Amino acid sequence: MINTLADRIRGLASLFWREVAKFGAVGGVAFVIDSAVYIWLFSGPMHGSEVWAKAIATVVASVFSWVANRFWTFRHRKQANVVREAVLFAVMNIVGLLIASGCVWVAKYLLGLNDKPSLFIAGSVVGLILGTIFRFFAYRFWVFNEELDEEPAFSHDHELIEAHHRAKAKAIHATSADAGSDEGEEAVKRR
């Protein structure tokens, strides 16, 4: 039972860290896409419209991020209902954006930091880190939350999860059997 539990923990940790690594890679590429599109737009076709340029760059990077997370990072958890998944993804991204904006608000209005480097650090470092942590868990548990499928690349993970369920059932059975034998022993002692 201990070995089965250890296998389960190792399997889940392995799956978790693979998802974290893939999520980080997707986020890094999305950041590059966002920055490149933003710089291209505000220095060229949208010169003078930096806010709209940033909005378009964010949408392009978000679409890339959704597709990459759906078909790579969380491909073993993607939902059958694509529209629902896309809407949840958009909502979680809006919450992540509010987290980053909230960090800027705290820095500016509560801490009184008005210089550009402080506000940049608040929004693009602290806000990015907190928003990314939120997004990972939101994607993992709410957006891409279907059970593991039968893709060959994830068959081992699926086996580990099934082994965990069997070990858990055995542990519950063993615990109830031990409790039952203790009750039986107490009944014999009382006789």
Image (cartoon, grey):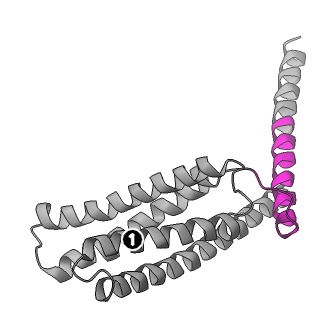
Q: Amino acid at mark 1?
A: Ile
Closest to the observer, 108 or 176: 108
User: Which portion, as a residue range, is magenta?
Assistant: 147-173
Q: Is label 1 in a helix, a strand or a loop?
A: helix
The x, y position of residue 167, in whole percent, is 85, 48
Closest to the observer, 71 or 42: 42
Number of marks in picture: 1
Q: Which residue is mark 1?
A: 56
Q: Residue at x 33, y 58 (%)?
A: 98
Query: From the viewer's perspective, is 106 left or right of 186?
Result: left
Q: Is residue 172 magenta?
A: yes
Q: Is residue 60 magenta?
A: no
Vertical comparison of 2 with 24: above or below:
above
Name the dominant secondary structure of the magenta segment: helix
Q: Residue at x 82, y 47 (%)?
A: 165
Vertical comparison of 54 with 181: above or below:
below
Q: Quadrant location of the C terminus?
A: top right
Query: From the viewer's perspective, is 13 left or right of 20?
Result: right
